[in-house]
Amino acid sequence: MINGAYETLQVANIPGNHPNQIGVLSGNVHDEAGMMIVGVFAGSALWWLLPSGGVHLVRHRLKPSIYTGISRIAGMALIGFALWQLMSLL
């Protein structure tokens, strides 16, 4: 009996759905899932480490008034997005 997930991959014709197929996702499904998890984790870590590292490097060069301005702009952006989402509910 064919596994439902494998059958779905066959119908969808996704690369890596057959052991003989050449592609990025060819091979063991469990290995592919593990690599996907590692890739998402590494990408997320890199995404947050680069901006926070950049802020750490330039933090001492900024005046407190610039921090205040950045905080106010970020706060207004968050409030704007929140209002936009609330308006979309109506």
Image (spheres, rainbow, N blue to C red):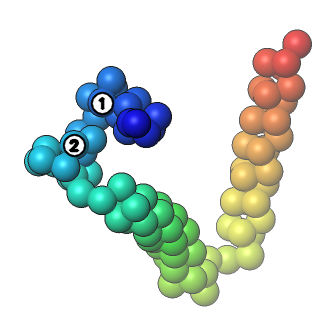
Residue 31 in view: yes
Q: Secondary structure at mark 2?
A: loop
Name the residue that disc number 2 marks.
18
In the rendered view of the protein, which quadrant contains the C terminus? top right
Q: Secondary structure at mark 1?
A: helix
At x 72% / y 52%, what residue is drawn?
Answer: 74
Is 53 situated above or below 30?
below
Q: Could you say which is closer to the camera, residue 37 or residue 52? A: 37
Name the residue that disc number 1 marks.
10
Q: Position of residue 32 (x, y in %)?
A: 35, 59
Q: Could you say which is closer to the camera, residue 50 or residue 32? A: 32
Structural crowding at the residue carrying mark 1, measured as other residues with C-alpha within 10 Å and reported as few (<14), some (14–19) or many (≥20): some
Spatial CA span between label 2 and label 1: 8 Å
Left or right, 54 with respect to 36, comes to: right
Residue 13: quarter of image: top left
At x 40% / y 61%, what residue is drawn?
Answer: 30
At x 40% / y 30%, what residue is drawn?
Answer: 8
Q: Position of residue 62 (x, y in %)?
A: 61, 77
Residue 39 in view: no
At x 82% / y 40%, what residue is drawn?
Answer: 79
Is 20 situated above or below 85?
below
